[in-house]
Image (cartoon, grey):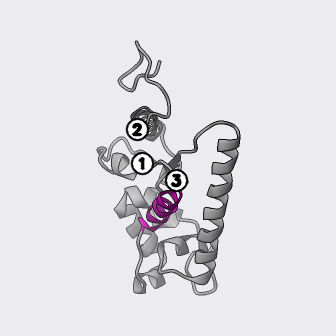
Amino acid sequence: DPQAIPRKAAPDGMPTAYGVYGPPEAKWEDAWHRTALLVGELRRAAEHAGARLAVAIVPSKEEVYPEWWEDVLDAYPLMRGRQWNPDAPRERIEQICASMGLPCFALAGALRAQPKTPPLYFYHDGHWTEAGHRIAARETASFLVAAGLVPATKGGNENGFR
């Protein structure tokens, strides 16, 4: 339902928040630079506390459901004349993590691999449904155990957690 898509748009008619999916622009490059600085601060804080930082990359609903991205384009026809990449934020976070040697994992693949029903996101606000939370929890637990960041426990579920 394109009518349900937020209507906060820049003067050119494009929603400001969707710029993160577009070609690099100075304001977004600055935002990514600041993001990298913040991730570095998080890493230092974790190390100071005797912990290791790992990053989970949570995809937008448009990254998981391409047909929902089409709804955005339908709601903002002027966006159709530009090049978009709904995977761009994930790709940038993966680059930041790699440059810092941080373990990270993207949930997009696991969420995309699920059947369309039940939906994993609420359409109107982009938050996970119960099913989305269940998949994210399972995948996160599997990653943490496989990366050696938490120990597997006896008697737990398939991920080693109770």
Residue 135: x and y in percent read 40, 38
In the image, which is nearer the foreground, mark 3 or mark 1?
Answer: 1
Q: What mark, if any, has residue 139 been given in the picture?
A: 2
- C-alpha span from label 2 to label 1: 7 Å
Q: Secondary structure at mark 1?
A: loop
Task: Determine crowd level at label 2: few under 14, some 14-19, many 20+ residues with C-alpha closer than 10 A.
Answer: some
The residue that disc 1 covers is 107
Mark 2 residue element: helix
Compared with residue 13, is residue 52 higher up or lower down, i.e. above or below?
above
52 vs 89, left or right, is right
* Disc number lying in front (3 or 2): 2
Residue nearer the viewer, 134 or 9: 134
Q: Any magenta on residue 88?
A: yes
Q: Is residue 111 above or below residue 18?
A: above
- Looking at the rendered structure, the kind of residue marked 2 is Glu
Q: Which residue is mark 3?
A: 126
Residue 128 pos. (x, y %): 49, 44
Front residue of 139 and 63: 139
Q: How far is disc 3 from disc 1 in space, using C-alphas?
A: 15 Å
Magenta stretch: give its range: 86-101
Q: Relative to the observer, which residue lies in front, 56 or 6?
A: 56
Mark 3 and mark 2 in contact? Answer it, CB < 8 Å.
no
**At label 1, which amino acid type do we have?**
Leu
Sequence-wise, the earlier of marks 3 and 1 is: 1
Mark 3 residue element: loop
- Crowd class of label 3 (few under 14; some 14 to 19; many from 20; radius 10 Å): few
Is 40 above or below relative to 113? Answer: below
User: CB of mark 2 within 8 Å of CB of mark 1?
Assistant: yes
Measuring from the top left, give residue 142's x and y in whole percent.
Answer: 40, 34
Asked if residue 116 can be seen in this view, the reply is yes
Residue 158 falls in which quadrant of the image? Answer: top left
